[in-house]
Amino acid sequence: MYKFKPILKSLIWGGEKIAPYKQIETDQHNIGESWELSGVKDNESVVAEGPEAGTPLPELIARHGSALLGRENFERFGTEFPLLIKFIDARQDLSIQVHPNDELAWERHKSKGKTEMWYVVAADEGAHLRSGFAKEVTPEEYEASVADNTITDILTDYKIQPGDVFFLPAGRVHAIGAGSFIAEIQQTSNITYRIYDYGRVGADGKPRELHTELAKGAIDYTVLPDYRTHYRPEYDKRVELVSCPYFTTSLYDLTRQQGVDLSRLNSFVVVICLEGSGTLTSDAGSSVSIHQGETVLVPASTWSMGMIPDGRMKVLTSWIE
C-alpha cells in the first residue's frame, strides 16, 4: 500500500483550507488544488514513504504491472495511471467548463476525455456549484449566452452541503462555486474547455483564454430534472455513489473495523480519507496509517483489506470494474 507526496497548486482562485485539512505545513498560499494521485504527464505523483519512496508513479507501475493496476487495467492503460484524485478549495467561483468525451478528445487532442465526480467535503455558508442546463438550449443559444454574459442564467445552480455528490459525465457543463471544498475523482486527462470566466484576468493581467467554440461541439445539451447523485448514508457498510466505465466510487462511514473482500476485483483501490483517522491492513500483512486528507493506493494483488477507524473514519474508495 502506497502513499504519495501531494502536488499543491497555487491558483488565482485558491483558498487556504487545503494545508490545514491535510495537516501539512507549507509556505504556499492560495492552494486551489492538491493532486493526491496523478499520472498526468509532468505532474506524476511520487511515492512518499517506505522502501520505494521517491519512485514516480509511472515507474512504480512499470515495476509491478498487473500486480499494481490489475491485468485488464495494465493492458489498457500501460504505465499511465487511469485516475486523477484531487482536493479542490475554491475561494472564488471557478470558470464554467466542459470536458470532451473520449472520442472527441482523441480526434482533437490524441487524449482521453474526462468524466469526473465531486464529493463535497465542506461548504461555506452560501456555497454553491453549477451542473447541467436548467432549460433546453440550442448550440446557437448557448453561444449567444456566453457573448451576452447570461450563461449563468441557463445553468442549474445548487446550494451545497457536506456529503453532496455530483456525477459529471463528459459533455456536462459545470462550475465549482465560491466556498466549495471538494474531493474530485476523474479520468486521467487535462483537457478542459473554459466556456466563461466572469471577465477574470490571469496572473499576467490578461483575460484568461476561453474555448467557447471548442466547447460548443463537446457539450451534451440534454436537460435532466436533477443533476445531483442521491444516496442513503449508512454506518459501517459500503454505500455505492457512482458506477461508470471509468470508476466505481463508494463511501464508508466507519465506527468499527470493516473488512473489504477484494478477491473478485481485478483492480487497484484508491482510498481517500475524508474525516478522522485509522489504519488500513491487507491480507499480505502490510498496514498503513491514514488520516483526514490522505490518499492511499492499494495494489490489485490485495485480496482483502481491513479498515480500522480510530473512533470514527469516513473514506471514499474508487476502482475500475
Image: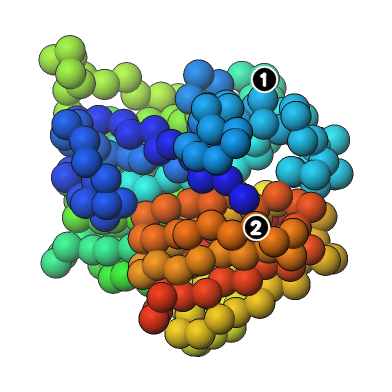
Which residue matches tag 2? 286
Check the picture and name the quadrant holding the C terminus.
bottom right
Task: State whether residue 251 is above or below residue 185.
Answer: below
Q: Considering depth in this image, is 263 or 191 the residue closer to the camera?
A: 263
Q: Which mark is residue 33?
A: none
Q: Nearer the viewer, residue 3 or 43?
A: 3
Tell me which residue sits at (83%, 66%) in the image.
Answer: 263
Horizontal placement of 232 versus 144: left or right? right
User: Where is 178 relative to 308, above or below?
Assistant: above
Q: Looking at the image, is mark 1 or mark 2 earlier in the sequence? A: 1
The x and y percentages for residue 49 are: 50, 39
Q: Which residue is mark 1?
A: 110
Identify the secondary structure beneath mark 1.
loop
Instruction: Give the residue displayed 21% in from the left and 36% down from the top.
Output: 26
Q: Residue at x 75, y 29 (%)?
A: 63
Which amino acid, by three-letter code, is at mark 1? Lys
Is 104 in front, or is 10?
10
Residue 254 seen in this snapshot: yes
Q: Is residue 166 left or right of residue 105?
A: left
Q: Secondary structure at mark 2?
A: loop
Image coordinates of residue 55 in percent, x first then y, are: 58, 27
Q: How is the image coloured?
A: rainbow
Which percent across, then down, holds residue 241? 56, 70
* Tag 1–tag 2 contact (CB < 8 Å): no
Residue 133, visible in the rendered structure: no
Residue 270 lies, with reference to residue 62, above or below; the image says below
The kind of residue on which mark 2 rests is: Ser
Q: Is residue 152 left or right of residue 214?
A: left
Q: Quadrant of residue 210?
A: top left
Q: Residue at 42% of width from left, 53% of height from top?
A: 294
